[in-house]
Amino acid sequence: MASPGPGFEAKKQKILRDLAAPDEEYTDLSPKGSVDAGIRDLIHNINQIPGLVTTSSCAGRISVYLEGGGSGREGTRVEDNKNVSFKESDRKTIEAETEIGESSAQKAPQFAPTGGKGSGKWLFVSHEPVEIDQSCEGNYLHEIFHLVPGDEKIGIANHPGRLRLVRFHFEPMILHIMASSLKHAQPVLAAATTAGFRESGIQSLRCLDDTEAYPIVAVRSSGLALESIIGFHHQQPIGNESEDDIVRSLVSEDYLRMLLAAANERFKTNAERRERFWTKLQELCKGHAGDISSRRPDWEDPEARRERKRAEGLRRSKAAMEAKAAQSGLDTFVDIMGEEGEPSFLYP
């Protein structure tokens, strides 16, 4: 396998310089803004392997997220348990039809469209298991998740406007690793799927047509993920933003404790898979003779090493026998030249 080219090495060195910056100076695009402590050793070890460099990472996280309000002109209303998309131009007609034969308390809720970049809000984020203090009573988790306990009812009639949902998430580790070639990417993908990150894959294949592009392996798994809607926020109509700007809970304190306990257990499984991934990656990299690996400069092929050790052993054995013979005063052989000039050997 060819060695990484200068273009890849230049990109790798830039990434490594950024990672080497002090914590107070380093920033990235994640909500946390830095590399997670639980994954730093793995990042360091991967970056020691020629032909590989990490481009983004998350050790895994527990989060509570308030969805954004959306910036588009489309919304969604819930009707007979079916989602129906509609445009703003149809809103008045839909509202008029809804009012016929219905009281205001019976109107279906309208949900704010998801995916509004920048308009959502992280209510809680942790990149490690969250200890549950069993001695704490009351609404301990509601407080740290910034939720106001409710009556487990949405109360559409009293809260006009769109609903923004609050979601509890557990997300397992995700890594993006850039490789200098598809050959270098192959052991990464194999190690990931073997370790349990079965949704892993190669995201970019531009390298097939562009020599300046490099494949990126996404190490990920959706099997460990956990998600649950636990609350809501009423997005007020324009002009009424000051009214009831509260994030309300839809679940009990016991339900939140159950979710958190489940997420903590998945963190343990996540850590086990992470260790298996690194162990397998080391094994596969060392299995490519002459290819990518974390070999030292004095690395020696195992077969050549065995032959060298065998020859050294024979030499030591011969030297020991000769030394023993010299000490005993015995000659092992005498070389006497004959009359014809041919050597002859006399043994004692």
Image (tube, grey):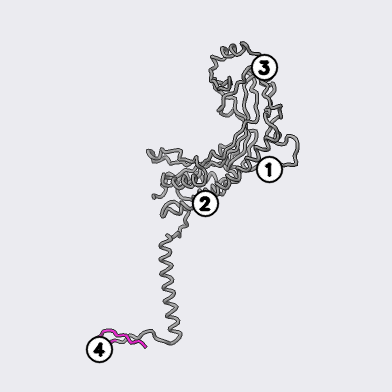
Q: Residue at x 54, y 45 (%)?
A: 19
Sequence-first tag of 4 and 1: 1
| SS state under label 2 | helix
Q: Residues within 10 Å of mark 3 (few under 14, many from 20)?
A: few
Side of 149 relative to 54 (left or right) = right
Q: Which mark is residue 85?
A: none
Residue under pointer 3: 105
The label nearer to you, 3 versus 1, is 3
Please tell me which of labels 3 and 2 falls first in the chain: 3
Q: Which circle's residue, 1 or 2, is located before the other in the chain?
A: 1
Name the disc covering residue 339, or none: 4
Q: Which dot, 4 or 2, sits closer to the camera?
A: 2
Quarter of the image where one finds residue 307: bottom left
> Quick one: quadrant of the C terminus?
bottom left
Badge 1 amino acid: Glu
Q: Which mark is residue 279?
A: 2
Q: Position of residue 114 (x, y in %)?
A: 56, 27
Label 1, label 2: how far apart the Cα atoms are: 29 Å
Q: Secondary structure at mark 3?
A: helix
Label 4: state its secondary structure.
loop
Residue under pointer 1: 131
Structural crowding at the residue carrying mark 4, measured as other residues with C-alpha within 10 Å and reported as few (<14), some (14–19) or many (≥20): few
Among the 4 quarters of the image, the one containing residue 131: top right
